[in-house]
Image: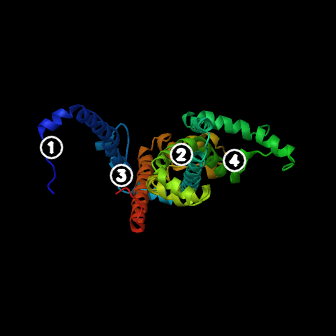
Amino acid sequence: MKAKRISWKEIKRQKFLMVCTLCFVVYGIVFYYLPLGGWIMAFQNYKSRDGFFGSQWVGLDKFKFLFSDATFIRVIRNTLAMGVLNLVTTFVMAIVFAILLNEVRLAMGKKFVQTVSYLPHFLSWIIVTGILHDALSSSGIINELLVKVGLIDNPINFFAHKGYFWPIVAFANVWKETGWNAIVYLAAITSIDPSLYEAATIDGAGRWAKIKNITLPGIRPTIMILLIMNIGNVLNAGFEVQYLLGNGLVKSVSETIDIYTLTWGVSQNDFSLGTAAGIFKSVVAIILIVAANQFAKKTGDSRLF
């Protein structure tokens, strides 16, 4: 079948859509592709006064420095650990929450819970971390409850123990994003043919059987697409929550690549080092997305390309 040729008449008829599309294309080029030219700084000893063309070319020296720096290796470990933990917890909780919310039969109750659940998404991390600080402080509600029920004798300083930091960050992400992330799964569930549930009811299937055999297979393509996209963001473990909750006592487990870039790149005016760290994140993200997409292709699941 020959491809349909687009005539000037058709373009004029769709001129409004063409203009809107062009605006987004220009936006993408200006803010996503043109800045990639700044990657040249990673291969230079960039100085602001000399610019791109006057700065000394150093090749891969900045990358060699990064991977020979014990601090950066530890930062990669922290970022990867928190990224994987955030991915698993937020991803699974969003699916579970969407399925459970879909099972609520009271319409008003369902709308109320859904509204309350995604409101934290609109709160800034300043507010979220402030709530966490108050709740987990020595005189906070968590310590008071633990002492009153007899689980502990004395209040715990949660922000002074390294072992608590990663779970706290994961909990903060789950609380803030679960309701918002569940929206797309709820939309996918509503697209499932209701006759499938009716047939399952006639066959005597219970709620769990319907979830297992209808709901989960029905939203599987959505799950796979979002999983592939989120895998690419594993190294984007965050900046604000770690920066705001971290302190000197837990610095060895709280520092991420973004914080490292701020500390040793921006603050020290070593923009080349910060750019090299950013390129490393981008390359890893591309590799992870391509690998996940190829795996989905081999298993016959939905994929990006």
Q: Give amino acid for label 4.
A: Leu
The residue where tag 4 is placed is 249
Q: What mark, if any, has residue 182 been given in the picture?
A: 2
Label 1 CA crowd tier, 10 Å (few <14, some 14–19, many 20+)? few
Image position, residue 44 (x, y; %): 36, 49
Q: Give amino acid for label 3.
A: Phe
Instruction: Determine whether the residue tagged by mark 4 lies in a helix, strand or loop.
Output: loop
Q: Is residue 264 left or right of residue 154?
A: left
Q: Residue at x 40, y 59 (%)?
A: 302
Label 3 CA crowd tier, 10 Å (few <14, some 14–19, many 20+)? many
Instruction: Determine whether the residue tagged by mark 1 lies in a helix, strand or loop.
Output: loop
Q: What mark, if any, has residue 43 been given in the picture?
A: 3
Marks 2/1: CA–CA distance: 39 Å
Q: Is residue 86 left or right of residue 18?
A: right
Instruction: Determine whether the residue tagged by mark 2 lies in a helix, strand or loop.
Output: helix
The residue where tag 1 is placed is 6
Marks 4/1: CA–CA distance: 64 Å
